[in-house]
Image (tube, rainbow, N blue to C red):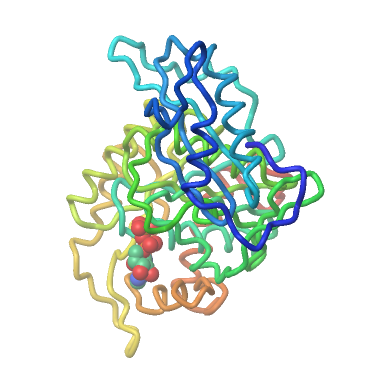
């Protein structure tokens, strides 16, 4: 990402049209054709002065197009009102290209000040991945760790709402975005950069462009653990994150229904393929906890995730009930572990946090009460 030399955001924010005009004044090498006219700009998002876009290239052009990428970034940055620009080169993967090998990534770490990065993932949307990620992050903070929450859910960023954040991140003197603080956790969301109703198709490189901005260009400071709320699914975007972010492990959230479990299995396979340890499976909406009488009812074929975890040889971490109070807590911006710390479900989230902490214990600062599992 590039940042402007001046902090003042003029009253009028840049529009997509002004950014497009600026990008079209950047021409291709040995050509008079602008980037827009040449059809090279894709996935342009302009939101509150933050600009993200991709420049499509043939992989063979990577060297000659890198200076063009930098020029395009500077051109967008020069538009009045622009606060940050993140431009990435995107190339369709050639079918003949060998799959990237795990462990051979020579790029410097994107998060040098974070001891352990944990992805919270799910095979599909709507299973409660974000709810689990936020309660896990807050429970880890309550246990005394310095915690960051990075909401990378490109299809529906929800951390600001679930953590009760209405402010937007500011820039510090070094032109880095300052994470927002909520419930003892440092929070950044891809929702701060892109419109929530944006229907664009995110490809892996585009996601990485925006995510790199949220990692490298954010003043995270030293953290014991960062929770990444992953986009649901196991496509190109998710695979790219799993490959490029130095993950200590992944937590897979699933509902008890078999269909969701098949999706969860795909998620596990994806992380295994890139040698990211699976910290375990969480079964969310595992059983119904009646808000009136506290009665527990197994409305789905409860226990499926536990069996699946056993079959796949990964730890089973928690059974979280389907409980209206969990949704209400998220909707009002105060995760359950804060709004009802004495509840049964808050204890379940704390148990989850303890298990995660135990598994990443070697990476985080000394935690004498924790033993390995
Ligand atoms: P995902 O991140 O997988 O798309 P969310 O965390 O956004 O899912 O959850 C989807 C919806 O279900 C939200 O309205 C959330 O409040 C609700 N929800 C998630 N987990 C529970 C639960 N255990 N009990 C009740 N409601 C839940």
Q: Nearer the viewer, residue 15 or 50?
A: 15
Can you give x and y, in whole percent of width and height, for residue 283 in the image?
A: 33, 57
On screen, residue 280 versus residue 296, left or right, reads right
On screen, residue 344 versus residue 12, left or right, reads left
Q: Could you tell me if residue 108 is visible in this image?
A: yes
Q: Nearer the viewer, residue 181 or 14?
A: 14
Can you give x and y, in whole percent of width and height, for residue 262 in the image?
A: 21, 44
> Residue lying furthest front in this view?
32
On screen, residue 369 versus residue 47, left or right, reads right
Q: Nearer the viewer, residue 246 or 303?
A: 246
Q: Could you tell me if residue 242 is visible in this image?
A: no
Tally the numbered discs.
0
Quadrant of the rendering where the N terminus is positioned: top right
From the viewer's perspective, is residue 177 above or below residue 247? below
Q: Quadrant of residue 284?
A: bottom left
Give the residue at x 56% y 55%.
354
Give the residue at x 47% y 26%.
34
From the viewer's perspective, is residue 61 above or below residue 226? above
From the viewer's perspective, is residue 85 above or below residue 131? above
Ligand 1 placement by image quarter: bottom left
Q: Quadrant of residue 272?
A: top left
On screen, residue 194 versus residue 267, left or right, reads right
Can you give x and y, in whole percent of width and height, for residue 115 in the image?
A: 67, 40
Give the residue at x 57% y 63%.
139
> Residue lying furthest right in this view?
173
Can you give x and y, in whole percent of width and height, for residue 87 in the image?
A: 54, 33
Give the residue at x 54% y 78%.
339
């Amino acid at each position: 990402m590039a940042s402007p030399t001046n902090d003042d955001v003029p009253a009028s924010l840049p529009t997509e049209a002004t950014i497009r005009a600026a990008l079209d004044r950047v021409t291709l090498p040995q050509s008079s054709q602008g980037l827009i006219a040449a059809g090279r700009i894709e996935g342009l998002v302009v939101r509150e002065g933050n600009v993200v876009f991709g420049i499509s290239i043939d992989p063979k052009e990577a060297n000659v197009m890198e200076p063009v990428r930098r020029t395009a970034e500077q051109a967008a940055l020069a538009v009045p009102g622009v606060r940050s620009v993140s431009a990435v080169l995107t190339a369709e993967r050639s079918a003949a290209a060998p799959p990237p090998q795990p462990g051979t990534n020579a790029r410097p770490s994107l998060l040098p000040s974070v001891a352990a990065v944990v992805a919270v993932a799910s095979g599909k949307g709507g299973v409660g991945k974000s709810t689990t990620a936020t309660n896990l992050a807050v429970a880890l903070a309550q246990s005394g760790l310095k915690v960051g929450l990075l909401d990378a859910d490109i299809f529906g960023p929800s951390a600001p709402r679930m953590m009760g954040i209405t402010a937007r991140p500011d820039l510090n003197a070094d032109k880095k975005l300052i994470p927002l603080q909520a419930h003892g956790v440092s929070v950044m969301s891809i929702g701060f950069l892109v419109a929530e109703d944006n229907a664009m198709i995110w490809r892996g490189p585009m996601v990485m462009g925006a995510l790199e901005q949220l990692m490298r260009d954010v003043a995270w400071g030293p953290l014991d653990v960062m929770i990444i709320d992953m986009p649901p699914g196991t496509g190109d975007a998710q695979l790219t994150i799993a490959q490029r972010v130095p993950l200590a492990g992944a937590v897979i959230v699933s509902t008890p229904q078999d269909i969701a479990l098949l999706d969860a299995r795909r998620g596990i396979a994806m992380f295994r393929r890139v040698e990211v340890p699976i910290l375990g499976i969480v079964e969310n909406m595992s059983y119904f906890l009646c808000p009136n009488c506290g009665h527990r009812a197994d409305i789905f074929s409860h226990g499926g995730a536990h069996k699946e975890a056993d079959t796949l040889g990964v730890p089973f971490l928690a059974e979280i009930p389907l409980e209206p109070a969990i949704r209400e807590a998220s909707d009002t911006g105060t995760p359950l572990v804060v709004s009802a710390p004495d509840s049964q479900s808050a204890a379940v989230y704390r148990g989850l946090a303890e298990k995660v902490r135990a598994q990443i214990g070697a990476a985080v600062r000394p935690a004498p009460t924790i033993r390995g599992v």
